[in-house]
Amino acid sequence: MGQGRGRNAVEVVKKNFTTGFSFIELLITLAILGLLFVPVMQLFSHSLYCTASCQELITATNLAKWEMERIKNLNFTKEQLKKTGSLVYPPLDEAPLEMNKLCWRIKREVIVNSDPVEVRVSVFRQEKQDEPIIVLVTLIEDMTWTEIRPVN
């Protein structure tokens, strides 16, 4: 009777070893998971970079549109606009605009030799004043009426 019990114990132990994972199988599984994890992490970091870049571009575009609307709402004639010339907003001796945790400056250039007057608005970050993020261009023409008559 003693021998029968010993065999059952050995068979049970053998069954436990055959149903589990070996160390090599676990290492191979971890290596495959590691290889799949790297591209996912690269995709995640790339999406963060693209989000920050798009946020910067959207802010610059909105600032350029804002400045362009400011120019149009001044109702300057072509000659008055030419006299104002190019300028930077806010001026370089003042603090820059702060939006979305970045510092911005807006540069307005009036091209004097053009008819209608060409106006370029460049938006750039404080740190990179030589590299505009966006440039908007518009043409300004005098809108004067020589005569106003009622309609019959």
Image (cartoon, rainbow, N blue to C red):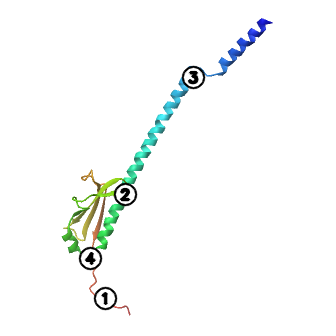
Q: Amino acid at mark 4?
A: Asp
Q: Amino acid at mark 3?
A: Glu
Residue identifier under label 2: 59
Q: Which circle marks residue 148 in the picture?
A: 1
Asked if disc 2 and disc 1 are in contact, CB closer than 8 Å, the reply is no
Q: Earlier in the sequence, mark 2 or mark 1?
A: 2
- In the drawing, does residue 104 fall left or right of residue 25? left
* Disc 3 to disc 2, C-alpha distance: 52 Å
Q: Which circle marks residue 142 in the picture?
A: 4
Between 67 and 118, the one nearer to me in the picture: 67
* Percent x, y of residue 45: 43, 42
Q: Quadrant of residue 124?
A: bottom left
* Percent x, y of residue 68: 31, 66
* Percent x, y of residue 103: 31, 54
Asked if disc 4 and disc 2 are in contact, CB closer than 8 Å, the reply is no
As drawn, 67 above or below 142? above
Q: Amino acid at mark 2?
A: Thr
